[in-house]
Amino acid sequence: MGSLALNISFMTYGLAAMAYATLFGLLVQKKQYKGDNIWLSAAVVGSLVWAVLHSAVAVAGAYTTDVFFLITIYIMPFFDWLKSILWVIFLYNHLRIIWNAQGNQKISIRTGNIITIVASIGVLIEIINVLALWGILDREVIGNLPTFNKFFLSFLVLLLIENLYRNITSENRWGVRFFCLGLGSIYAFEFLLYSDEILYSLIDTQLYEARGAVNIIVVPLMAVAIARNPKWSVGISLSRRAAFHMVSLVAGIAYLMSISVLGYYIQNFGGDWGKLLQVSFLFAAFIGFVVIIYSGKTRSTILVLLNKYFFMYKFDYREEWLRFIQTMTASEDHYNLSERAIKSVAEIMESRGGALWYREQPDSYSQVARWNFKHDVENDLLVEDEFSRYMLEENWIIDLNDARDGKVLRDGLVIPDWLLSERELWLVIPLIHHNEMTGFIVLFQPRTEKELNWETIDILKTVSLQIASYLAEQETLSALSIASEFEAFNRKFAFVIHDIKNMASQLSLLQKNAEKHGDNPEFQKDMKLTVKNTVEKMNDLLSRINIIKEPSKTKQISMIDIQALVSKSVDKMLTAGHNVKFTGLDGELSALSNQDDLETVLMHIIQNAIDAGMPDGMVEIKLNQDEKYAMIRIIDNGEGMDRAFISNELFRPFRSLKVGGYGIGAYESRQLIHNMGGRMEVKSKPGLGTTVSIYLKKE
């Protein structure tokens, strides 16, 4: 190096030594040189000696080649490492106090062991390096390890600074903010310097000389922090989000450091192909890095490790509740409330998806929504089923993995096969509202293995209660909306009453005059015109409006012959020329029903199936039974309906896929079946037709 550069080194490192001396004097004045801050004093003194040595080397190299210069130049790399390890020990000491206060003694011990190993290996490398510089050992034995040693320490200091700052509560950060900024800036520069040396096998002279200037600039920031009497270890506030991002940042930097080092060696040992291999490797590693970043399983694994080793409680309840509320009220997305309910629970449990069963019918739970649920599990669960009663009575969350492993929840309890047969199904979470189970949520297996302990069960029960209340409120609002639509519809009908009265008056007058003038050809001609005009007006009114009333709940329910009634309805359709096939049972099939209402329901559903079917298609009607129910199934081969329409539109009045239809029939039919104590199910897929199943109680 030239004399000008040496003079610059002397000045910059000399001023840096003066800055560190001033900082040490401030520590003494503020009495922060003892107790927990003893390592702070040691690190400042180490940095002071480091700056003095660099300044001395500049002077000795410019004017002499005596032993002093040789000793200084040989031991200076050791002090580069020593001052960094002193800063590491200082930062760890305060983090240790915080971790112990959190009750995380294990992480404190592990980190301490790691730093001890790093320090031991580091001092061994530096001693070997000094011996190699003196010529006692071969230089090739040590290779580039001293540079990697200092490079790793720079990264470790940055990591500990980040961790310390995140662990201190916001009200105490003002005292250490400038200190962390100053020390972090120094070691960010050191990180850049050694990265450059590793990549190019040569120290950048300008970066090397600038180290003194960097210390001069940032040491005053550290002095400001010391003047504020910072409370290094007071107050603990490490959120899971901060910890997650910190760990992700550290893992990302470590990954990039690793591929940079490997890329360097690939280039060196790759010969003529070295550059090509290096570029290909770095590109592939970068793509892998991006894939890992966006991996849900990786994110879940990091969170599990954080919760297991860093926190006393598994959940950050504030963040979980805020996220739950945000998900449930996010009306701007395309999910309905039921889908958002599944999503909110799945996010808490790091599950990939799930489905929701709801008690839309009096005696069964049907699947009404799914979120990232790819399986064809659509079975209904009866309210009277023992499994349903167990969830209601115990308010218990079922872990299906336990049942598959042979763990009995209760003697004699039978879990439905359709739940156990799908290996990807994990939890069954009941939704309890006012001591009634209104439904349940089934979740997929989590991305990473999770323990279903008391804390998990508590948060799931709390969330499920809130979801049940949301769904009950939505059901109430939906009923009010339907009532409002009926009211508006009936108000419209009131406006045509006057026209109907006029037409009735005209027909009444026509009847009276017919008795007197029935034989008069002119009267007959006028009568035809009047009747024709009246019929046209009535057809026009019927095309625009219809009389709608809520199905009566007071009609007599009794045991009737279902097979005879269905056969009668089919005969009417056959007489009208429709292609209908009926498959009955041997003997009589009786169930609780109202004959007129059931006939109305059958005629409506069969007619809908005929309208929906292909021109040459057939509507098939089948009867079946089990111990509790008589079952009527009406099957067509029409265009079918999607799940969203069945769940959200089919059974709402004034929703119809028919041109000019009112959408009343399906609503009225289901209400009539409910009033009989039965239930109605609709299974359909676009392009595959529709099956409507009616279940009527046999007793």
Image (tube, helix red, strand yellow):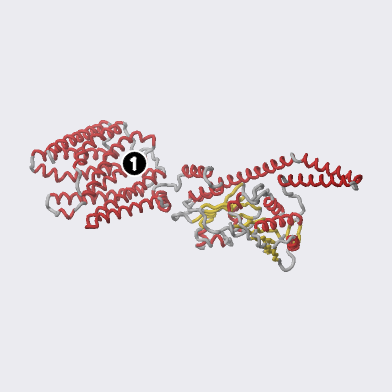
Q: Is residue 527 left or right of residue 268?
A: right
**Where's residue 463, x and y in %?**
53, 47
Q: Quadrant of the C terminus?
A: bottom right
- Camera-side residue of 462 and 439: 439
Q: Is residue 629 left or right of residue 9?
A: right
**Where's residue 409, x and y in %?**
55, 59
**Where's residue 574, x and y in %?**
73, 62
- Camera-side residue of 43 and 601: 601
* Residue 159 makes an appearance in the image: yes
Q: Quadrant of the N terminus?
A: top left
- Camera-side residue of 252 and 466: 252
Q: Is residue 674 left or right of residue 687?
A: right
- Camera-side residue of 216 and 400: 216
Give the residue type at disc 1: Leu
**Where's residue 567, x and y in %?**
74, 63
Residue at the location (67% across, 58% down)? 609
Residue at the location (22% across, 44% down)? 82
Residue at the location (48% across, 56% down)? 445
Q: Secondary structure at mark 1?
A: helix
Badge 1 density bin: few <14, some 14–19, many ≥20, Cα 10 Å: many
The furthest residue to the right? 516
Q: Quadrant of residue 611?
A: bottom right
Against 632, residue 666 (above or below) is above
* Residue 569 makes an appearance in the image: no
Kindly identify which residue carries mark 1.
164
Q: Is residue 5 left or right of residue 392?
A: left
